[in-house]
Amino acid sequence: MTSDLDTDINKITTPTQQPLSSPPTSQPTTKRPRKPKPNTSPFWATLPLLPAPKPPLPTPRPRPPPNTISSLPIPPLSSPSFGLIQETLATSPFALLVATTFLTKTKATAALPVFRQLMNLYPTPEAIAAADPGVIQNMMQPLGLSYVRTKKIQNMARIWVATPPDKGRRYGVRNYPAQGGGSHVQQGGVFGPEDESGVGCAWEIGHVTTGAYALDSWRIFCRDELLGRAEDWKGGGRGGGFQPEWMRVFPKDKELRACLRWCWMKEGWEWDAENGEREVLREEVRRAVEEGRVGYDERGELVVLGEKRGEGYGGHFQGTI
């Protein structure tokens, strides 16, 4: 029989039995991502966002003054004509003067179709003089200044019919060919063919028109034939020493200037439209014209294309890109 003492001894000497089990495992801890700190102060976040500055626009090239740059391409020197309507009307001087009235302050693309319509309907100065002004005015309405143009055209026609131009009679014109010119003559005063006081200030059509553009056009394309100097405006029928009238004209109109510059190049010269000075046409310029490598700068001067500006071209023929 076991005593109580033995039982107590056994409790002391017998190790306490622990249940067999795996040690408790610790749960993995998930780290919360750290909130990034702002790079800028919260103060700036309250300000509105401004658009990024735009790059500066390129400085625009200055627009050329009016009546500076010809609208016609420069033809090769081997071409028989430059391309002006006046060239086709050289043998019809009255029609040429009418055309200049249409082309004043109006683009050729708009003016010439109406001009041809008028001449088809009224082909002679007699027909225009007798026409109903309302018909002509309605025809010219799209061009503007229809009343003024109609009155001018019919007035020219009546004068032409009554007193056609004659090589033995000239009429004084003031302020032509330059402002202040002809101040010593009476406007419309009659001069004989040998009267030297009318040289350079009296013209065979001075009683018909006094406009510089009309007078320049008529002198270039019609005067030599009227005076019997040559068969045409190019000096046809004359020897090499003859100087046609066009060589003495210094027009202000951009198209006439371009045409005469081209005419002078056909003669072998580079021509200054302001003072008439000439230089021998350079071979590189002649070749550029033939190859279509020429144009105009902002001053209306001829430039050779395809070369850097200033390389080998001076005066009126500066290279450009």
Image (cartoon, rainbow, N blue to C red):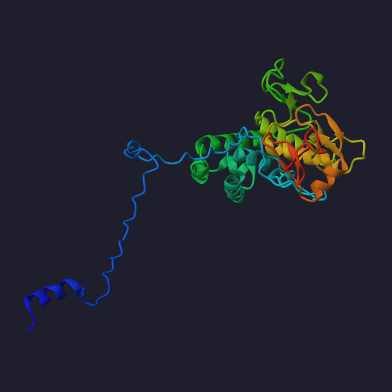
Please say if 271 is above or below 132. Answer: above
Please say if 257 is above or below 80. Answer: above
- The residue that appears at 37% across and 44% down in the rendered structure is 38
x and y percentages locating residue 71 in the rendered image: 66, 43
Between 213 and 31, the one nearer to me in the picture: 31
Question: Which corner quadrant of the image does residue 281 belong to?
Answer: top right
Q: Residue furthest top?
A: 184
Between 20 and 237, the one nearer to me in the picture: 20
Q: Which quarter of the rendering shows the N terminus?
A: bottom left
Q: Is residue 163 visible?
A: no
Please say if 208 is above or below 239. Answer: above
Between 278 and 252, the one nearer to me in the picture: 278
x and y percentages locating residue 213 in the rendered image: 67, 33
- The residue that appears at 34% across and 37% down in the rendered structure is 47
x and y percentages locating residue 283 in the rendered image: 88, 43
In the shown orientation, is residue 229 left or right of residue 149?
Answer: right
Q: Residue furthest bottom?
A: 1
Q: Is residue 117 visible?
A: yes
Between 21 and 8, the one nearer to me in the picture: 8
In the shown orientation, is residue 22 left or right of residue 232?
Answer: left
Q: Which quarter of the rendering shows the C terminus?
A: top right
- The residue that appears at 42% across and 41% down in the rendered structure is 51
Image mark count: 0
x and y percentages locating residue 94 in the rendered image: 68, 40
